[in-house]
Image (cartoon, rainbow, N blue to C red):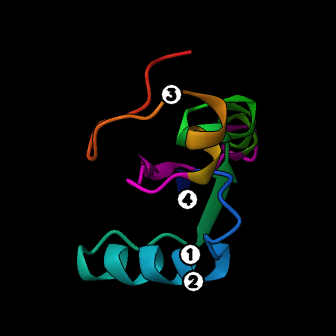
Amino acid sequence: MAAIINVCVDPRLNHEVIRAQVRARLERLRLPAQLVYITSDVGGNLGVSFRSTAELVLKNQDRVEFAAVFHHDDCVAFRATSAARAPGTFPPPS
């Protein structure tokens, strides 16, 4: 079983820490995932890396147990590519 987590390309985000946090949370929810993939796209939006990772998991005949897109309010990439937004709102669709 696998989990796929998509985050922003923000350089402040540590993928190893996120992976450990996700794995611990899933274990507490009794959804153990042997593989935790962290993908990145601008603004945390779903893109090619998320889709390609999902396709890879399925081609390997694994099951996606959990998928998530994490957004955060202080997104450097989003601020650099668009106008300011209200805290807590998600980026507009591309």
Labels 4 and 2: the sequence-earlier one: 4
Mark 4: which amino acid?
Ala
Residue 17 numbered mark, or none? 2
Camera-nearest label, 1 or 4: 1
* Span shown in magenta: 57-75
- Determine whether, in the image, residue 31 is placed left or right of residue 63: left
Write the residue at 53% across / 54% down: 5
Mark 2: which amino acid?
Val
Labels 3 and 1: the sequence-earlier one: 1
Q: Which residue is mark 4?
A: 2
Does 11 appear above or below 75? below
Q: Nearer the viewer, residue 21 or 92?
A: 92
Write the residue at 55% across / 59% down: 2
Q: Are marks 2 and 1 in contact (CB under 8 Å)?
A: yes
Mark 3: which amino acid?
Ala
Which type of secondary structure does the marked residue at label 3 adopt?
Answer: loop
Labels 1 and 4: the sequence-earlier one: 4
Labels 3 and 2: the sequence-earlier one: 2
Mark 1: which amino acid?
Arg
Q: Is residue 37 magenta?
A: no
Residue 41: percent from left, percent from top: 67, 41
Q: Are marks 3 and 2 in contact (CB under 8 Å)?
A: no
Residue 19 numbered mark, or none? 1
Q: Which residue is mark 3?
A: 83
- Dot 1: within a 10 Å radius of its alpha carbon, few (fewer than 14), some, or many (20 or more) residues? some
Q: CA distance from mark 4 to mark 2?
A: 17 Å
Write the residue at 61% across / 70% down: 13
Residue 10: percent from left, percent from top: 65, 58
Does 50 appear above or below 29? above
